[in-house]
C-alpha cells in the first residue's frame, strides 16, 4: 500500500519566494497611508485585513507600475494627433483657395472662409505655444 501525498501542491520554481534568492522588505505605513491603501484595495476587490492579500496587492502594483511620464506621453500624443488633424483640414482649405485663385475664380473666394481659416490657425498657434 502506497502512502498518499497530502498537503498543498508545490509551486512552480519561478513562483517560490524564500530567503535564499529573495529580498525581504518591511513596509511601515501610518494610519492615513493604510486607510488610503485599504480604500484602493477594496475598490479593486481585495481584502485589506488579509495579510496575504496586502502583500500580493502591493507586489502586483509594483510590478505593473506605469510611470507618470508614460501617462503624460499618451496625453501629449493624443494632443499632437488632434493638432495634426486640424493642420490637415487647414491645408486642404488652403489648397482649395489657392486653386481658386490660380484659376482666376476670385469671385467664389468667400471672406468667411478666410476668416474661419485664420481663426483655426490662431487656435492651433495657441494650443502649440
Image (cartoon, rainbow, N blue to C red):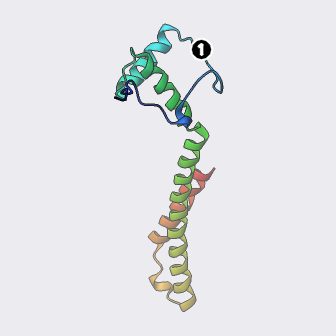
Q: In the image, residue 97 lies at what x, y percent? A: 52, 79
Q: In the image, residue 111 lies at what x, y percent? A: 47, 72
* Residue at 46% over, 31% down: 10
The single residue placed furthest to the front in the displayed view is 1
Horizontal side, residue 47 vs residue 21: left or right:
left
In the rendered view of the protein, which quadrant contains the N terminus? top left
- For this rendering, which residue is in front, 118 or 80? 80
Circle 1 crowding by C-alpha within 10 Å: few under 14, some 14–19, many from 20: few
Is residue 65 visible in this depiction of the protein? no
Is residue 26 visible in this depiction of the protein? yes
- For this rendering, which residue is in front, 124 or 97? 124
- The quadrant where residue 17 appears: top right
Q: In the image, residue 66 lies at what x, y percent? A: 55, 38
Horizontal side, residue 107 vs residue 122: left or right:
left
**Position of 102 relative to 2 (above/below):** below
Q: Secondary structure at mark 1?
A: loop
* Residue at 57% over, 15% down: 27
**Residue position marked by numbered label 1 in the rendering:** 26
The single residue placed furthest to the top in the displayed view is 31
How many numbered discs? Answer: 1
* Residue at 63% over, 50% down: 129
* Residue at 60% over, 55% down: 125
**Position of 116 relative to 43 (above/below):** below
Q: In the image, residue 16 lies at what x, y percent? A: 54, 30
**Position of 1 relative to 109 (above/below):** above
- For this rendering, which residue is in front, 42 or 14? 14
Amino acid at each position: 500500500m502506497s502512502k498518499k501525498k497530502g498537503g498543498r501542491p508545490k509551486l512552480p520554481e519561478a513562483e517560490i519566494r524564500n530567503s535564499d534568492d529573495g529580498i525581504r522588505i518591511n513596509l511601515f505605513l501610518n494610519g492615513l497611508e493604510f486607510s488610503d491603501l485599504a480604500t484602493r484595495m477594496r475598490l479593486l476587490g481585495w481584502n485589506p485585513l488579509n495579510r496575504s492579500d496586502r502583500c500580493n496587492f502591493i507586489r502586483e502594483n509594483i510590478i505593473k507600475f506605469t510611470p507618470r511620464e508614460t501617462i503624460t506621453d499618451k496625453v501629449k500624443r493624443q494632443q499632437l494627433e488632434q493638432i495634426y488633424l486640424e493642420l490637415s483640414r487647414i491645408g486642404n482649405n488652403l489648397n482649395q483657395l489657392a486653386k481658386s485663385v490660380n484659376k482666376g475664380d476670385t469671385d467664389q473666394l468667400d471672406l468667411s472662409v478666410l476668416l474661419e481659416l485664420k481663426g483655426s490657425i490662431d487656435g492651433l498657434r495657441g494650443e502649440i505655444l
